Amino acid sequence: MLPSISEELEKFRAGLERRNPGESEFHQAVMEVAGSIIPFIQDKPVYTKHRILERMTEPDRIIIFRVCWEDDQGRVRVNRGYRIQQNNAIGPYKGGLRFHPTVNLSVLKFLAFEQVFKNSLTGLPMGGGKGGSDFNPKDKSDHEVMRFCQSFMTELYHHIGPDTDVPAGDIGVGQREIGYMFGQHKRMTNEFTGVLTGKGLEYGGSLIRTEATGYGAVYFIEDMLAEQGEQIDGRRVAISGAGNVAQYAAEKAIQLGGKVVTLSDSSGFVYCPDGMEQEQLDWVVDLKNNRRGRIKEAADEFGWEFHEGQRPWSVPVDLALPCATQNELDAEDAKLLVKNGCIAVSEGANMPTTQAGIDYFQATRTLYAPSKAANAGGVAVSGLEMSQNIAKMSWEEAHLDERLRKIMQRIHDHCKEYGSNNNGHIDYLKGANIAGFTKVANAMLAYGVI
Ligand code: NDP
């Protein structure tokens, strides 16, 4: 008798945990995918015989290195740098760099694993990777950030290249950090190549890249709503975070007639019951990007409520876009959102909802777009930045936004194709996992056992 799906899943979990002890974020990301893929491949022995899922969980390689730099007082500081090259079956490794004190191997492995599926979903030829450091750029001067970035790149440059591995930004890595790292790479190799994406427009960056992740997450929710005959116009929207993804999710939601009632940072959230104006959002963007201030200052400026130490999921909204960090929305938050009338969730951040939170959304048939589909717009425009760099051209904003819009719609439609259930409900998580898996798996099969 064949083992049941739950027995298969438990066996798979035991192997995963034995090979990767203590890496809870990585276990969570892999088991969320396995929950869709193991049932899907049960009657497709070619994938099980070639151990494709197991092979996908094992990174092609992991590079770990010391990063030494000097602070403004001349003291020597030591951080740890990482690059996870997860899978390059369908293109060069591609994925961001995160600089945050919480960075460790488990976090980067979960992000690299997710990236493989996300990049596959974009339809562009990109493999998956991720990297970063436990360095905290927040409390450092510009010069300290520059010295750190130069030291980080002095080691990383051995392992990356426009046809090998093309990093980008993530939490704590914006255009400033990309500029310092790109400059150091150019200096060391004496080559001007598209080795990083998210660059400034003056040196090979692409229009719409900064906006792409946030815009894409809103385009995805627009498509999910359209499928149900609904729209964003007039809907109340909760957004967490106030960084790159949150800023442009808020901008696009406002453009489409949504009322953005919350933003947050790690100190708490602001609540603006009538929805914020674009000019108020511009003020927040300047606060966060240029003055590097705290979100509470926006509440003080505009008379909004500030809820210290809390996340924004307790206020009544129709739509929720978690855009800050992993595991920021748990089962209790999911229950509150649904109880207060939330009908759709689109994940701008990576893995922001815990497994119990996802289970609740699915049980209540809340429209739920997982990060690997909903936030794929960022890496998709990074892929377009790579194409422009190779062609030594710059495409126009309207063209890029149109390409982004179409890519998000295509991802939505792929998720629908693989995730439609007999009862009419679309399981976007299952759809994203299976659509992302199939392309990479078939490429791996073509290469034989390597
Ligand atoms: P930023 O560094 O620009 O902003 C991060 C935001 O999240 C800040 O408001 C930050 O608050 C908040 N935040 C970070 N950590 C925590 C925490 N532990 N608890 C509460 N709030 C926190 O990063 P991005 O906007 O680029 O990234 C946000 C998410 O989107 C991440 O999950 C990232 O992986 C994902 N993502 C980003 C892409 C991109 O193109 N940038 C592409 C795809 C996914 P504070 O300032 O107080 O730390």
Image: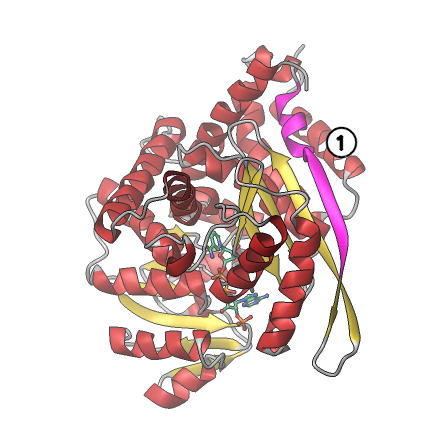
Q: Quadrant of the image for the C terminus?
A: top right
Could you say where residue 2 lies in the image, as x and y percent from the top left? 65, 13
Is 220 in front, or is 422?
220
The residue to which callout 1 is attached is 15
* Residue sitting at x 38%, y 54%: 209
Q: Is residue 52 magenta?
A: yes
The answer to which quarter of the image holds residue 228 is top left
Q: Quadrant of the image for the N terminus?
A: top right
The residue range painted magenta reads 51-67
Q: How many neighbours does mark 1 have within 10 angstroms: few (below 14), some (14-19), or many (20 or more)? A: few
The answer to which quarter of the image holds residue 305 is bottom left
Q: Is residue 433 magenta?
A: no
Decide if residue 269 is on the left or right side of residue 92: left
What's the residue type where badge 1 is placed? Gly
* Disc 1 secondary structure class: helix
* Residue sitting at x 33%, y 54%: 208
Could you say where residue 107 lies in the image, as x and y percent from the top left? 65, 52
The answer to whether residue 255 is above or below residue 302 is above
Could you say where residue 321 lies in the image, as x and y percent from the top left? 40, 58
The answer to whether residue 240 is above or below residue 414 is below
Q: How many marks?
A: 1
Could you say where residue 37 lies in the image, as x and y percent from the top left? 55, 27
* Residue sitting at x 68%, y 44%: 158
Is 139 in front, or is 197?
197
The answer to whether residue 286 is above or below residue 156 is below
Using the rendered image of the protein, determine whether residue 325 is visible from the camera's viewpoint.
no
